[in-house]
Amino acid sequence: MSITDRLFKLRSQMAALGVDACIITSADPHLSEYPADHWKFREWISGFTGSAGTVVVTNEEAGLWTDSRYFLQAEEELEDSTIDLHKMGEVDVLDYKEWLAKVLPSGSVVGVNGKTMTLGELRLLSKKLKSADIRLDARLFLEEDVWEGRTSIPEDGIFELGIEYTGLSRTDKVKAVREEMKKQGATHYIVTTLDEVAWFLNFRGQDVEFNPVFHAYVVISESQVSLFIDPHKLTSAIGKQLSKEDVKIFLYDDFYEFIKDMPPLAKVLIDPARCNSIVYNFLPTQSTKIETTSIITDLKARKNPVEIENFRKALVKDGVAMVNFLHWLDTSIGKETITEYTAAEKLTAYRAEQENYHGNSFNTISGYAANGAIVHYAVQEETAATLQARGLYLVDSGGQYNEGTTDITRTVALGDLTNEEKIDYTLVLKGHIGLDMAVYPEGTRGVHLDVLARQAMWKHGINYGHGTGHGIGHFLCVHEGPQSIRPQDNGVEIVQGMISSNEPGIYKSGKHGIRLENLILTCEDQETPFGRFLKFETLTLCPFDTRAIDVNQLDEQELNWLNNYHQKVYDQLSPLLKPDVKTWLKARTQKV
Amino acid sequence: MSITDRLFKLRSQMAALGVDACIITSADPHLSEYPADHWKFREWISGFTGSAGTVVVTNEEAGLWTDSRYFLQAEEELEDSTIDLHKMGEVDVLDYKEWLAKVLPSGSVVGVNGKTMTLGELRLLSKKLKSADIRLDARLFLEEDVWEGRTSIPEDGIFELGIEYTGLSRTDKVKAVREEMKKQGATHYIVTTLDEVAWFLNFRGQDVEFNPVFHAYVVISESQVSLFIDPHKLTSAIGKQLSKEDVKIFLYDDFYEFIKDMPPLAKVLIDPARCNSIVYNFLPTQSTKIETTSIITDLKARKNPVEIENFRKALVKDGVAMVNFLHWLDTSIGKETITEYTAAEKLTAYRAEQENYHGNSFNTISGYAANGAIVHYAVQEETAATLQARGLYLVDSGGQYNEGTTDITRTVALGDLTNEEKIDYTLVLKGHIGLDMAVYPEGTRGVHLDVLARQAMWKHGINYGHGTGHGIGHFLCVHEGPQSIRPQDNGVEIVQGMISSNEPGIYKSGKHGIRLENLILTCEDQETPFGRFLKFETLTLCPFDTRAIDVNQLDEQELNWLNNYHQKVYDQLSPLLKPDVKTWLKARTQKV
């Protein structure tokens, strides 16, 4: 079925339902970063396979709104589709809300599946359309009638992650959540994001790539935990255990009926940024809505001591895989043909050698020379560049282990470097060290620390467009909230137990890209009459490429940091390496 | 008349008007930092003379709400007044809004003079009271009936500040404001803060201490500039000139009638944070209110080239006065009796020797040893400490000159220092230099840069409770918005032409206080493919005390900064100094 045929069928259905335009987002009802195929209606209707993008279809026109990461890909994939590309962020490009308000006559009806939109976003949309006298129908489920060959929701089983990994039993987590509900005056708390469900229940699944989650909802009340899940996913042992713990099982599909039937006077805690709009709209009208950050978001961001110890183990394994890979790259470059694609495959193979490995935590970014400057470069086998024995190679990757999720970027010299490449590498390293060495009082937010990673390169008139740090899940999602180290303030304080990335970069179009990323744990520095001070502890174990550093540009503190870090990397990883790799690591962690 | 008698009279009047409680703020209708005596009703009714505080009186109780700067002073001044002190910021202390909502029965009426409260604050108050079913009357002018011996509004004259100082004629300013009004779609723009009126009209006055402002309002429309002012303030020459420029003069007292009578369909630009609430409430109901930052606030924050050149001249004069003072202090300490009070007087005398001096820009903070740790220490002749030839002395002061307003803090060693004093001095200096050397892309806000002044001391578990930088007026107010360098984000970008203070500090109660403050100008660093980058240029000229520095703690960049700065100070000031002072400065700016 061609895209134009699909659009024809969609428009027929729209006409039958009296809808003048429809919005198709890329989200699933759990607002996942990686939705299962079952939810990829936007991809089916448009042919566009990028992860971020919204399609809008009217009777006359169809458009895709996406950001600069996907302009090239979208142009190719939309060819012959009759769908126009709207380049978000470019001058004079309206967003899809403004566009709808402009092109539709007043009195029109716009439809959207409210399950695929956060409550916050729906409110903005509704306000915009209302101002143009356009009605919004947020319960339009066109995919149910239009989509031919739709796959079903994955039925893969789940497994329990033992307390030796989670550090807290389900019962303890229920208790902690209920305590917080009480503080907030909530009688019910609705959990809809898959990583929150997985963390809360100490289960992991395999429904989607990269994230070990499974499809389910949870509603926690003062007296009951209700789990909405496909029963095929549960072994009888798990089912019995849950029933012992008073966790009541419902069918996945019964979730929305359940919340419709909640007690009318319930006080429901709901996170407008982490919950789809239908959930909210199905709640009893009389019920009190307590809109705040999801309780589990805050609980799981503060890793407990057992989770932290496991993270350390995960990062030893990941370090061994990375060092094996970098050793192989260093000794093979110029001798055998290596492409960006085969390099990424090799790295995955090294990770797969590690115990309790459950795949990668995201699609490896493997970019040689100018390709390294494309921040979200998605390497493809057919178009991958061949690595040469010169210049810089950037590799951003991560693994999923029972012990934790990893995320690391290294940029390495494959041979001779230009002076500019060395200066830029050194500036990125200075920023990386600057943030890593930060000490900060309680109450500090990411917005306060971001400059420490940028100040060195700003003095050279260089900057990068992405954030410096994000949270990471414990054997969950590689991008996890709520903290964020970037110039945009989201109001979240960096607190003890949070694990964040530290990843400044420099990207010079047509030349090279450099990013250096470690994971850093927030821990106590000291308590003084001026309050409690926090600092970072570096968790990632993998050398930086000293051949790419202009040592003269590092001050004494930075040199000490680098040498101490390399000593730690060698001490912790060398006992686990084969002799030749060990020798290589010894050389690569030599004092500078 | 005792305070209790005053309160009795107030309560009688409240009863006559059917009001159950009244709020008396410390603000004048222009929301000035330094109101004239005519507006100090809160001081008259309570006896409390501090600059910040709100009095609330009910039939049974009376309370003063103030912050930690004034706890001691308020306790003393409120003795025998029957007014309770509510210590703002302490645990379990309600703010006055919450307190009113708690103590008053529903159905009560609370009154306030809406002229002494910003629109923003009044809205918060109104919302809080409404939630407790309490009515707010914002047009209660009790001071008119109760206050005996009230002084009148100052009638001092105004004078024109020539274009050689302002760089822009009144006509050009009118044009610039109208252009911005057009962009914002405003037909009228109401200017109520005194420094905005003064800057806009190129006049200065002498109605209050420290700020060269005069009492007036301005309303700018597309075709007219209306000035509301006591005609005694104008010479006939000024009156004629204004009439030539089509500036229409009205009586000061006619302002509120004028805005009541504005065209019903006017589109009025008004700044809710810089305008009293009555102004807003008097506007015609049908008129459109464009609530945004006052146009003049933004215009005057970006100093023009003539203003900047004048600032440089002001800072040479101020530097000469400071160096004369520090030389005198250095050569007199231990030989004659010097108190914190006489030292401050001496400094004022040195400033007064400078041309075009119009008094100080604020009350000099002159604190020896432990008194230096009291951030807003207000020295009094009777209680001033005597300076000894040991330890640290902090002096924060500024002058008003035709060429600009100054604000400088130096902390100096009066003799031997402890190791702790030296370490702390060096940490403050490192912070000061860290911010001064910052380079930052356009779009950067104060919240992003603040950490640069704190990172060194945070590593020692030390912090300070005040902001790092504020804007400063051009021969106007020493504290001027809108930019602010501090952990709290106010959303304002640091742009070219802004002049800010750079004033980190360390305060150890019972020991010592250190603050080092220069004025810094934002100018262009460079433009690159990554955008336009800005940097600071140091304007203040006065040496730091190298005897208080632990040189080993400064890195090479910091040492270079210090030596270059001292060279510049010597080069610019020495030609203007007497021989002995010049010799002293040579020694004090010696390379370290």
Image: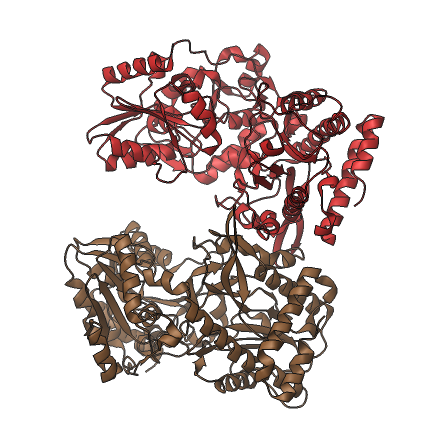
Chain colours: A brown, B red
Q: Is residue B172 above or below residue A119?
A: above
Quadrant of residue B473 within the rendered picture: top right
Residue beneath the point at 43% across and 52% down: A491
- Closest to the observer, A218 or B370: B370
- Quarter placement of the C terminus of chain B: top right
Give coordinates of residue B246: x percent, y percent: 52, 21
- Closest to the observer, A126 or B248: A126
Picture mark count? 0
Residue lying furthest bottom: A336
Give coordinates of residue A417: x percent, y percent: 71, 74
Left or right: residue A592 compared with residue B450: right
- Closest to the observer, A508 or A405: A405
- Closest to the observer, B346 or B153: B346
Give coordinates of residue A457: x percent, y percent: 64, 59
Give coordinates of residue A328: x percent, y percent: 62, 86
Q: Is residue B152 above or below residue A500?
A: above
Quadrant of residue A31 within the rendered picture: bottom left
Q: Is residue B234 above or below residue A73?
A: above
Residue B453 in view (yes/no): yes
- Quarter placement of the N terminus of chain B: top left
Residue B226 in view (yes/no): no
